[in-house]
Amino acid sequence: MQIKDLSLLFLDLDKNSTNRIKFKLFKRTKSILFTDTIDSLLQTYEKNRPDIVAINKDIENILNISILDIINSLQSNQPIFIYSSNKDANHFSKNDKKIFENKEIKKLFHMLNQASINIEKRINTCKLENFFLQLENFDPLTGLCSYNKIYDTLTKDIYRSNRFGKFFTIMIISIDNYLTMKNTFGEKFSNNILLETSKIITQNSRMVDIVGRWKNNEFVIISPETNKKSAITMAENIRKTIEEHNFEKIGRQITATIGVAQCNNNENIKDIIKKTDFAIYRAKKGGKNKICS
């Protein structure tokens, strides 16, 4: 299939970026469509079924949604390319004057003497891109958000809190005596604890909450527009469920200690994490299997 026969669909909110794309691809493809919302992307995709979908990775910061969620919503077997107009994007050149510096994407979009494209080869590239994106944002054991993804989400939520007065709470859930059990029974045993606990936490959190793996034996829940009192109620439900859960593969009772903190105006990420960690410290010192705020 030749490039002139390809139809492309873009999701991009950056006008400078879309103008550069239009200039570079003008009259060189069968059709090129631009969307600036998730809904319009899905509707346009369903209506036109383009050969290739391209998504500007920078929308994650604007729409507060992961690229993987968008890709999963499309349910597409066609190639999906992730690009960026951000000079700090780790899979692109530091030169932000060109948005198509990724080696694979450059083959398609840069239009250097190339007259055709093998779609099948691009599918493998797409899958590899998605794999690394998933590895960056999700914990490989539990499937929850990774430390980096949670840290990034916290940074954005704190910015919104300070700028627009949007409040949120964070709770860190620490499995009691985890290191002792891991050293005594081994990694397979401890991994089962983490997996079972992650399921309990997910089942007892809300759809709007961000749930992730924080550190070795710690999980985190970020609850937007939720006050401390409501978060403590949720934390108690999680603590009690873990305590009463029958860990069949483990054969012993597991408990967890939970620290809860509400983000106030003019706090930074270090402040909110320090408050939550100190709450856990006080709860552990008070006998574990407790909640402190």
Image: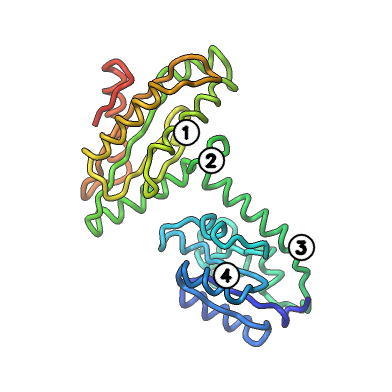
Q: Residue furthest top?
A: 184
- Residue labelled with disc 1: 198
Comparing labels 2 and 3, the label whose residue is closer to the camera: 2
- Residue labelled with disc 4: 99
Q: Which mark is residue 143?
A: 2
Comparing labels 1 and 4, the label whose residue is closer to the camera: 1
Q: Is residue 278 above or below residue 220?
A: above
Within 10 angstroms of label 2, few (less than 14), some, or many (20 or more) residues? some
Determine whether the residue tagged by mark 1 lies in a helix, strand or loop. helix
Q: Earlier in the sequence, mark 4 or mark 3?
A: 4
Label 1 to label 2, Cα distance in Å? Answer: 9 Å
Q: Earlier in the sequence, mark 1 or mark 3?
A: 3
In this picture, residue 289 sits left or right of residue 27: left
- Residue labelled with disc 3: 121
State the colouring used for the structure image. rainbow
Q: Is residue 36 above or below residue 270?
A: below
Label 1 to label 4, Cα distance in Å? Answer: 38 Å
Residue type, mark 1 in image: Ser
Label 2 to label 4, Cα distance in Å? Answer: 31 Å
Q: Earlier in the sequence, mark 2 or mark 3?
A: 3
Q: Residue at x 44, y 36 (%)?
A: 214
Cβ atoms under marks 1 and 4 closer than 8 Å: no
Residue type, mark 4 in image: Ile
Determine whether the residue tagged by mark 2 lies in a helix, strand or loop. loop
In this picture, residue 84 sits left or right of residue 202: right
Q: Name the image quarter holding residue 202.
A: top left
